[in-house]
Each structure stands twice: as C-alpha cells, then as structure tokens.
Image (cartoon, rainbow, N blue to C red):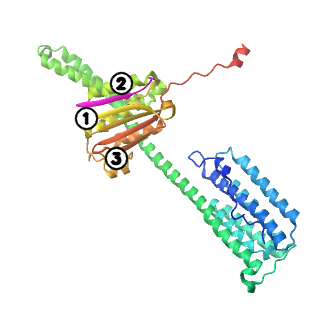
Amino acid sequence: MDPRTPGAGAPASPALFELAPADEAHGAGLRNMQQLIELRWYAIVGQVATIGFVHFALDIELPLVTMLGIAGCLAAFNLACLVFWRPRQEVGDLALLAALLVDVAALTAQLYLSGGITNPFLFLYLLQVALGALLLPGWAAWVVVAAACAGVLGMVVSPGPVTIHANPARGVADPYVQGLLACFLLTAALAALFIGRIARILRDRDARLAALRQQAVEEEHIVRMGLLASGAAHELGTPLATLSVLLGDWRRMAPFTEHPDLQQDLDEMQAQLERCKSIVTGILLSAGDARGEAPAQTTLATFLDGLVSEWSATRPVCTLDYRRHLEADVPIISDSGLKQMIGNILDNALEASPDWVGMEVRLAGGDRQTLVLEVSDNGPGFSEQTLANFGKPYNSTKGRPGGGLGLFLSLNVARSLGGRLNASNRSPGGARVVLELPLAALLPPQPDPPDPDADDDE
C-alpha cells in the first residue's frame, strides 16, 4: 500500500481559500497554486493514515521513520508555500512546475519505500501528469511527464526494501486488489474535483482576457474618434471666428439697425454661434485632459444644478423632473468628460421622450461614497438586442449613421472614472439608465500631511 494516498474524507482547510480571494485582482496562477497546496494537504494526511494502516493493520513492515520523515518534509514545504505565496499577486509557470516536481519526487520516494513497482498506488503518477498538462505550457508539462517516467523506471531498475505480492484470484480480499481499487477511486475523485476547479479558473481567466481585449478595441476606437473630433474642432475655429466678425459687421449696417426683427435674428445667430464655440472649446479641453490643465473646484450640488440648468436651457424639453437627494454637499473637481457624459444620457432620453425626462441623484453605498445618477424617460424603451449589446459602438435603434455612439462614449468615460453604466426598461413603459461613480474619483486631491522629520531638520 502507498502512504501517498490523499486521505479520503479528510476535511479541506477552510483557511486556505481565505489567503487570497478569487477576484479580478489575483491571477489564475495564484489560484492554481492554492489548489495544489490544498491537494498536497490531502496527500500528507493520506500518507500518514496509509502508513499506519499498512504497517499495523496489514502487518507489512515499512521503514516508518524514513516515510514519516518524507511526509514531514512535504508538510514543511507546503507551509513554506503557504507563507511565501500568500502576499503575492501572481504565480509563474516555473513556480507551478517546481511545485509539481516536488510532488512527483515525494510520490516516488514513498512508492520506492512501500513496494516500488508492485505498489498499486503507482497510478497516482497519472494525476500529477494530468495536473501538469492542465496547468503548464507544453514544454513544462513534458518535464512532469519525464519526471514521472524516470520515477517508474528507477523503481523497475532498483526495487525498494518492500515487495507486495498480488493474488488476484482472491478478489476483493486481496490487499493488492483493495489498493488498486482505492487508487482508482481516489484518482478519479481527485481528478474530477481539482481538475474541474482548475479548469473553471482557466475559463474565468480566458473570459477576463477576452473582456480586456474587447475593452482595448473599444478604447482604440475612442482614441480614433477623439483624434477626429480634435482635428475637426481645430478646423472649425477659423470659420466660427469669421462668422463672428461678419455678425459684428452686420449689426452696424443700415438694413439691420433699422429693423428690430433682423436685430433679434442676429442675436439668436450670435447665441448659437457662441454655443458652437463653447462646444468646440469643450472638445479641445477634453482632448488635452481638462482636469490636469485647468481644474475647477466646485461642489457636487453646484455642478449638477449648473449642468441641469444649462442643458434644459438649450434643449426643447417640455418637463425635466430633476430631483437631487443629497444629505450634505461635498466638494468635487468639475470634470468636462463627466459633464458631457451626463449630457449624452439626457440627450438620448430626450430623443426617446420629448415630453418628459426624469433625473434623480443620490449618494449610496457604504458611508455614502457612491454617486448614483438615474435618468428615466417615457419612451418605447430599449429592445432586447440593444440591452444585450449595451455600451457597444453603433448599437442603436435610431437607424442613422453614428447612432449609439453617445452611450458608448458615456460607458467608457464612466469606466475611466472607476464607475459603471447600466440600462434597463421601466414598468409599464420607458427606459432607465443608471450611472454609478465612486465619489473618490471626483474629490479634489488631498494635501500631503506635513513631514515631522522635515520640521526637525529645519
């Protein structure tokens, strides 16, 4: 019998999975190392239990001191892995390969001392090979295969101190057959349990990589649009300045000075021209990172009230139901990107529901540290396809070129600020877009605390 048997029925160590949560901040390599550490605890418990059963119950003389010493060394190695990898964020292929080679070496030593090639638990090598093929790149997996083959060949060439005699005619009563059945059940159960977990970890990693690739493609798309918008804004500066000069000349010409109606038209044209200049200036500031160049400190309530006032004054909205639920105002840095993002959301709601647009603002989350902005309308709502592809460029039911870019840009601005944007349909009708932003992304930078050592030096 083989003391390497991974302790069927031994409880898993609950603290093991607390050493690092399986979240986005930790890599798949670290989580795979955790699985190997847990599997090794099973193996150590199984070794000790099997040594005692074989030596005392089956009366097979085993070198107890040496075999228990190997189990102790394996336990010490596992504790070292637990301490060393606990604060780490990622585990490389070489570390996983080294851990598996240690397991193969320990299995070889225990098999050599407890029957060698005649030990029915010889097939536990296949579990190590399967783990290597799943966890490691091709070259490293073949290193594990070579190590396992070397161990088997070594026991063929140099038999150990114990020989187990098989008598299959006795059926289940034969200790060798019992060990063979136990080996099969353990290998099948552990393979299903741990390889299933590891496969799930790898699938999660692939899903995250696919999401990151998609995000990179979307950000590249945004960069291209930003370059085009910045170039267009520069080009529009000259014609807008020319129109401003012409309007100033027209104001002094006789046909316009003698007719108040024409003067009123000139005033409206001048107002729209100023709005165009403001839009162009906003594009150029956004392209140059307005927050970094000219930060404007304000408060959350002032920022939102000003945004709503400006938006409602320049849009043909019948009713804007604006509700602000802020227990206390907080200072923030005015962000042009955030302002344009909220404007895009409001514009989409207005286009779907010209008669009524609702906007509700509140602080939520722990210690009220999340800004929640909800924009609602009474329009037809989102289609299932639009909701399924929400945030993708050109995902729109408007049927015109460029449709869907507003929400696409809004989603990416929210993502850049550490927030998220969700869409849903209201009951009985209409749509709802909810923006959630961490308030810390909008707070002004805090001054560094004074250095007491610097004062002492002075």
Q: Nearer the N terminus, badge 3 or badge 2? A: 2
Quarter where residue 271 is shown: top left
- The answer to whether residue 391 is above or below residue 333 is below
Q: Position of residue 192 (x, y in %)?
A: 61, 65
Is residue 320 one of those drawn in magenta?
yes
Disc 1 crowd rating (10 Å Cα; few below 14, some 14-19, many 20+) is some
Is residue 227 one of those drawn in magenta?
no
Which residue appears at 73% of the width and 51% of the height?
81
Quarter where residue 279 is shown: top left
Residue under label 2: 305
Q: Nearer the N terminus, badge 2 or badge 1? A: 2
Q: Position of residue 65 (x, y in %)?
A: 88, 62
Horizontal arrangement in the rendering, residue 404 relative to residue 367 (left or right):
left
Which residue appears at 63% of the width and 59% of the height?
135
Mark 1 → mark 3, Cα distance in angstroms: 25 Å
Amino acid under disc 2: Asp
Q: In the picture, which quadrant includes the N terminus?
A: bottom right
Which residue appears at 72% of the width and 80% of the height?
172
Horizontal arrangement in the rendering, residue 166 relative to residue 202 (left or right):
right
Amino acid under disc 1: Trp
Mark 3 → mark 2, Cα distance in angstroms: 31 Å
Residue under label 3: 394
Residue under label 1: 356
Q: Nearer the N terminus, badge 1 or badge 3? A: 1
Instruction: Please give the range of residues in magenta.
Output: 315-329
Disc 3 crowd rating (10 Å Cα; few below 14, some 14-19, many 20+) is some
Between 268 and 225, the one nearer to me in the picture: 268
Please tell me whether mark 2 sits on a helix, a strand or a loop: helix
Horizontal arrangement in the rendering, residue 233 relative to residue 1 (left or right):
left
Mark 2 → mark 1, Cα distance in angstroms: 18 Å
Q: Position of residue 89 (x, y in %)?
A: 64, 45
